[in-house]
């Protein structure tokens, strides 16, 4: 029996509720798939910070390096100034564990409503590869004369050739493997960001010849927002920097049915990866069992896929697809079921599908 050690960070708000459902589904497929999961829970997030002043104790990062993967709920607390927990936990983990890919599939499950008129599951099926350790997120910059009328604020986007190349390489390989049009679209802003986007563009076309079967395309990020709404079927794999990737994946989430459906993986292909629903902590729903756990369950599925457990991952996918047909809506409070009931159904259907 194959054993995986998984670090679990339930986190803030509704994070613990949706993580509980993801763990339920993992337990359900484990036996039939011949897998064993050892979960170790880490109490990190707003409550701990408010109680102890600790954000991410230094001892935690080296500990996390020893796990097969990390499963995260959500980070963000209404009583904590924005930035402290996000930078101190989520971004610090992405950076320190060098999770340089943020993989965000935008998939409309059959039977799920999209806000896009006349678009269906065949049209909405692409993946965003977001660079996850550089760009505007690198934290370069600072203030001069802070708080005075003469204040200057500088926030710089850091783009290294190595960082761009490793991200592009992952994206090209994914486009080749996905076998759905084999098209890779670079999303940038070459008409304005004539240093940073230019580096991305040169690196992109320099690498393209190594992947002759992949069709390359380019779209400005603003136009991408338009095409994602008007012609989402044009996209197969998109690759972009950290900030653009953050923005377009919220748009991606809403066209695939909402934040309750969208899953993401912070990947270090050579190290420890971390999987999370991308919707955030949704504090107003905390404890009400109203939020949709599908995103968290799909994140668990992506975790298994990344670990090489294709069969168990496919069973979870089948379980999700069957369950969404039994749900009234993907929106919190409108599912016709509560959080736990959705998890129960996926667990049952997934176990049957192994
Ligand atoms: C995301 C989130 C984070 C990000 C926040 C919470 C720091 O929006 O994962 O997309 O900006 O990366
Ligand atoms: Mg975001």
Image (spheres, rainbow, N blue to C red):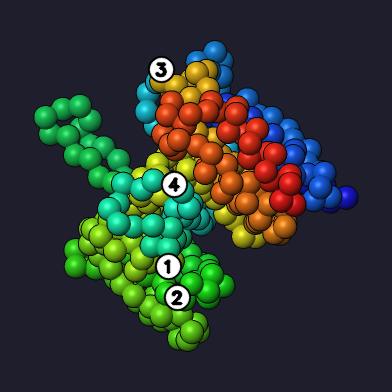
Q: Which residue is mark 4?
A: 112
Task: Determine whether the residue tagged by mark 1 lies in a helix, strand or loop.
Answer: loop
* Viewer-side residue, 224 vs 134: 224
Q: Is residue 22 above or below residue 320?
A: above
Residue 173 higher or lower than 317, as above or below: below
Ligand 1 near label 2 (Cβ, under 8 Å)?
no
In percent of width and height, residue 307 lies at 70, 55
In the drawing, does residue 280 fall left or right of residue 303? left
Q: CA distance from mark 2 to mark 3?
A: 46 Å
Q: Secondary structure at mark 2?
A: loop
SS for tag 4? loop
Q: Residues within 10 Å of mark 2 (few under 14, many from 20)?
A: some
Give the distance between the C-alpha atoms of the residues marked 3 and 1, in whole angstroms. 40 Å
The residue located at (43%, 63%) in the rendering is 122
- Frontmost of labels 4 and 3 is 4
- The residue carrying mark 1 is 236
* Place of residue 134 in the rendered image (x, y in percent of width and height, measured from the top left): 42, 54
**Which is nearer the N-term, disc 2 or disc 3?**
3
Mark found first going from the N terminus, 3 or 1? 3
Is residue 60 among what the camera can see?
A: no
| Nearest to viewer (mark 1 / mark 4) | 4
For disc 1, the neighbor class at 10 Å (few under 14, some 14 to 19, many from 20) is: many
Q: Are marks 3 and 1 in contact (CB under 8 Å)?
A: no
């Amino acid at each position: 029996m194959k054993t995986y050690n998984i670090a679990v960070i339930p986190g803030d708000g509704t994070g613990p509720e949706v993580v509980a459902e993801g763990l339920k589904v993992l337990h359900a497929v484990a036996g039939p798939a011949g897998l064993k999961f050892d979960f170790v829970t880490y109490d990190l997030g707003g409550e701990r910070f408010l109680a102890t002043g600790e954000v991410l104790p230094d001892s935690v990062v080296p500990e996390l390096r020893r796990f097969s993967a990390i499963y995260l709920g959500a980070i963000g607390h209404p009583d904590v100034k924005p930035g402290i927990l996000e930078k101190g936990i989520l971004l610090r983990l992405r950076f320190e564990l060098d999770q340089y890919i943020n993989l965000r599939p935008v998939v409309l499950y059959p039977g799920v409503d999209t806000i896009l008129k006349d678009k269906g599951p065949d049209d909405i099926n692409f993946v965003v590869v977001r660079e996850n350790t550089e760009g505007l997120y690198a934290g370069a910059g600072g203030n001069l004369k802070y708080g005075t009328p003469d204040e200057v604020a500088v926030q710089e986007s850091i783009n290294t050739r190595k960082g761009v190349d490793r991200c592009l390489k992952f994206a090209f390989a994914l486009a080749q493997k996905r076998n759905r049009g084999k098209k890779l679209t670079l999303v940038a802003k070459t008409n304005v960001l004539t240093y940073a986007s230019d580096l991305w563009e040169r690196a992109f076309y320099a690498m393209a010849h190594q992947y002759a079967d992949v069709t390359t395309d380019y779209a400005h990020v603003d136009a991408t927002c338009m095409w994602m709404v008007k012609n989402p079927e044009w996209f197969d794999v998109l690759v972009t920097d950290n900030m653009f990737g953050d923005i377009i994946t919220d748009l991606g989430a809403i066209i695939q049915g909402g934040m309750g459906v969208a899953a993401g993986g912070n990947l270090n292909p050579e190290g420890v990866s971390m999987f999370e629903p991308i919707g955030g902590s949704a504090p107003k729903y905390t404890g009400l069992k109203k939020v949709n756990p599908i995103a968290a369950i799909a994140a668990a599925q992506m975790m298994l896929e990344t670990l090489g457990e294709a069969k168990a991952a496919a069973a979870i996918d089948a379980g999700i697809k069957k369950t969404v047909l039994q749900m009234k809506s993907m929106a919190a409070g409108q599912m016709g079921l509560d959080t736990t009931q959705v998890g129960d159904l996926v667990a049952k259907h997934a176990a049957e599908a192994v």
